[in-house]
Amino acid sequence: KTIQEAKRICLNVFLNSYEVQLQEYDQQYENEFLQLESHLLNNININGSCVYQQIQQHMNYQTNKLKRQVSMKIRSLRGILIKNRRRSSSAKNTIGVWPEPYIDLITNVFNRYEWNYLSFGPSCIRINQSAIRPRHQQEIAIQKDHKSIYDKVSHHLNEYYFVPMAASILKQYLNQLLHDLNLSYFSPLSYNDQTLALKQARKVVSIQRKIKKHHLILRVTDKGCNFYIGTEKEFDKKAQNFFQDTHAFIELKENPFNKIQDNDGIPVRPIENTINAPTTNISNYLDEIIRPIFDKECQNTTIIDGSSLIQALHQYMREGLFKSTTLFCTFDIRNLYTMLPQEEALNILVEFLNVHGYTKVKGIPLETIRLLA
């Protein structure tokens, strides 16, 4: 492992040195080309403009040809590396884990490259997205970022440190911020980064077109942090089945607010988003003082993740309880968010604390905990 890391470091050093040399050659090429342009345009004996255009077309053709050759070479070498890696992995008898999306289709309409990209999941961020956009879109993005950052910084300094909005230091910061954003957006990319950014952008566009063409639904799963892919019809059917199974929702054919206020026979149970509510700190505090009790009392029967499951199975085997007739049973709670009875959950919480000998937690009586929860 140490040797492999040393090889990686040496490879990165060589690649960085080649990158610097390429930038120097590129600058030298630009200077020579400008001198040639000046010489041709100032020469009265020939049509300098026409000759310059022909030379420029030839140079662009040769440059694009070289880029294609380099790209094909990189693709070939990448294929060789992948084959060697697969051969090495199979030789070590290791198992690879790849969080693929959940697909609810008869046939997979995505090719291998698109499917691998979808397997990165919703947390994947395309590299250098702004660098391959048109110039005017980059300028619009710079203006938005510039205004957003400057407004937040200036208001914060004004509110907490009483810095005047017209202070000269803020004007200097305004100009420096604009300069840094321009430098960040318009700095040229290396050929490798530019090629990778364009490939990822093409994959995304291709995936979007197939989703639109085949009338698919792409959603983030509630568990597993990956994608669900299915047809619009199947998705609507699942939604209708969910409504029928849970009876948690009703379809209203008119404006419901008046009848809800009058409570005209409509069973209404509001679902509120209280993530940033004033009571959030109370919930966090209760979790902080009660969770250690649960972890302590239930550690022998709690499975947290796959590693915890393997450790529990090893302990089960050491105790001689693991046999060929042992059955594994799993279950899943459906529709927990809308169907969880709050009063029953509070009763279970208080009963759990009573069973394990707690009448108070951190000096707070259980009845007070019930009211706070």
Image: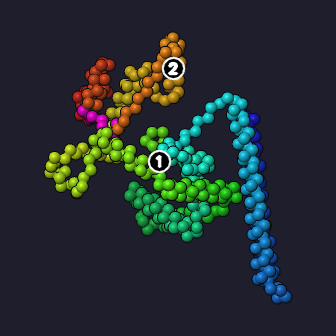
- Identity of the residue drawn at 38% across and 46% down: 237
In the displayed structure, does residue 144 sit left or right of residue 278? right
- Identity of the residue drawn at 57% across and 57% down: 206
Q: Is residue 279 visible?
A: no
Q: Which residue is mark 2?
A: 313
Q: Which residue is mark 1?
A: 230
Quadrant holding the N terminus? top right
Label 1: element kind: strand
**View extreme (right): residue:** 45
Instruction: Name the one closer to the observer, 115 or 258.
Output: 115
Q: How many marks?
A: 2
- Distance between the Cα atoms at labels 2 and 1? 36 Å
Q: The magenta stretch spans which residues?
A: 336-343
**View extreme (top): residue:** 320
Q: Is residue 62 visible?
A: yes
Q: Position of residue 104 (x, y in %)?
A: 48, 44
Whichever of callouts 2 and 1 sits on the residue coming sooner in the sequence is: 1
Q: Position of residue 289 (x, y in %)?
A: 35, 30
Instruction: Name the one closer to the observer, 302 or 75.
Output: 75
Q: Position of residue 136 (x, y in %)?
A: 55, 70
